[in-house]
Amino acid sequence: AIAARYAQEKYKVGKVLIVDWDVHHGNGTQDTFYEDESVFFFSTHQSPWYPGTGTSDEKGRGKALGTTLNVPLPAGSGREEVVEGAFGQDLANKIESYRPELILISAGFDSRANDPLGLFTLSDQDFFDLTTMLMRTAKEFCNGHLISVLEGGYNLDGLARACTSHLRALTA
């Protein structure tokens, strides 16, 4: 949230897309921009799960109605639900009309298979593919402007592998 606002104030970035792909809903980020049409917040997260927010009917308020897109998913969700469904369809259908100038990734890796905290089943290849999708979007709409911020992951070996896949896609 701070990075989005900083980019808007310091670099005069207009529209920002924030993508949060870990198992927790980004309630603080959503709350910060819930009435701000200059930031589109997209979250895939395990539901039910802490913090218990992020229902699909939370879509923004006032002029920002439609700039929040939550995709709560059940435990066990993986490539089909996250990569192909939420990102490949739900988010892809919104990006063209929103046309962000900057993409920020809240890159938490507790949605990776075998993480002791989350119960998603994403693979290292899935993180590579998600990142590649967002890099293509950044090239198409944002002159390649994309920032990724590491948030979490609690299986340290898995975290290292998922981060490596993510970084490979960022530098491809």
Image: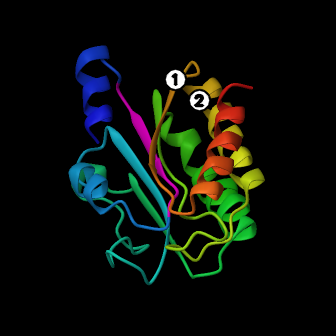
Give the residue type that dot 2 points to: Ala
For the residue pair 50 and 94, the one nearer the viewer reads as 50
Classify residue 54 as left or right of residue 33: right
Q: What residue does disc 1 label?
A: 145
Start-end of magenta stretch: 14-22
Q: Residue at x 31, y 33 (%)?
A: 3
Coloring basis for residues = rainbow
Return the disc, 1 or 2, that comes first in the chain's sequence.
2
Q: Residue at x 34, y 41 (%)?
A: 39
Q: Is residue 172 above or below residue 124?
A: above
Q: Residue at x 25, y 57 (%)?
A: 28
Give the residue type that dot 1 points to: His
Q: Residues within 10 Å of mark 1 (few under 14, many from 20)?
A: some
Q: Is residue 133 above or below residue 111?
A: above
Position of the N terminus, as image quadrant, is: top left
Q: Position of residue 161 (x, y in %)?
A: 68, 49
Classify residue 78 as left or right of residue 35: right
Classify residue 98 as left or right of residue 140: left
SS for tag 1? loop
**Which residue in the rendered view is the most extreme toward the top?**
11
Q: What residue does disc 2 label?
A: 138
Q: Which mark is residue 86?
A: none
Q: Position of residue 14 (x, y in %)?
A: 35, 26
Q: Are marks 1 and 2 in contact (CB under 8 Å)?
A: yes
Using the numbered discs, state the Cα–Cα distance from disc 1 to disc 2 in whole angstroms: 6 Å
Classify residue 126 as left or right of residue 64: right
Task: Decide if residue 10 is in sight here.
Answer: yes
SS for tag 2? helix
Q: Residue at x 33, y 79 (%)?
A: 52
Task: Decide if residue 133 is in sight here.
Answer: no
Q: Is residue 63 above or below residue 120?
A: above
Residue 67 located within the stretch drawn in magenta: no
